[in-house]
Image: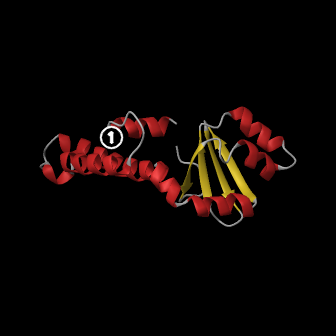
Amino acid sequence: MKRINEYKKIFGITGELQLKELKSVYRNLVKEWHPDKFQSDDAKLAEAEEMSQKIIDGYHFLVSIAPETKAANLEEYTSTIMESGIEDFQHKGLLLEMTFTDGSTYEYFGVPRSVYIKLIQSDKQVRFAKRSIYNSYLYRKSKRGTLDN
């Protein structure tokens, strides 16, 4: 959740996330912070390079959790959670990362440690996840196989 709030702050998003608005803000921020606007001896060049990378990372992250993206990928997600077993999972902070037997990995945000412990202790983890995790927490498909926070 910390990462979501950090990226929303960079993009000035306070309400519901809209892709059209996000894209517009992204373009303006990239223009403002592009490192090529600064001279090599300019003290702001390093800051611009760092900010530019944060903007790019934040844009891709926010696109991945946007309602439009989730709606477009709902069929694939539903297929994964209904037909695949859980291969592996990790919990760090409030982030639960699950890898499924079909090879896909999803990150679930805001998952408290108590829910994670119940998942570990459950003798039917897939059933527990279907009831208590899959549609209860904000999620996104992850390209990585390890926690990144």
Please tell me how crowded label 1 is: few (under 14), some (14-19), or many (20+) other residues with Cα within 10 Å.
many
Q: Amino acid at mark 1?
A: Phe
Q: Position of residue 109 (x, y in %)?
A: 58, 41
74 or 104, nearer to the observer: 74
Q: Is residue 123 visible?
A: yes
The residue positioned 66% from the left and 33% from the top of the image is 112
The residue positioned 49% from the left and 49% from the top of the image is 65
Find numbered disc 1 in the image and state the secondary structure of the residue it sits on: helix
Asked if residue 1 lies left or right of residue 47, the reply is: right
45 or 32, nearer to the observer: 32
The residue positioned 31% from the left and 46% from the top of the image is 21
Q: Position of residue 81 (x, y in %)?
A: 69, 57
Looking at this rendering, what residue extends furthest in the bottom direction?
A: 102
Tell me the residue that label 1 is attached to.
11
Looking at this rendering, what residue extends furthest in the right direction?
A: 123
Asked if residue 69 lies left or right of residue 118, the reply is: left
The residue positioned 49% from the left and 35% from the top of the image is 2
Asked if residue 82 lies left or right of residue 51, the reply is: right
Q: Position of residue 143 (x, y in %)?
A: 53, 59
127 or 34, nearer to the observer: 127
Q: Is residue 40 visible?
A: no
9 or 77, nearer to the observer: 77
Q: Position of residue 15 (x, y in %)?
A: 40, 35
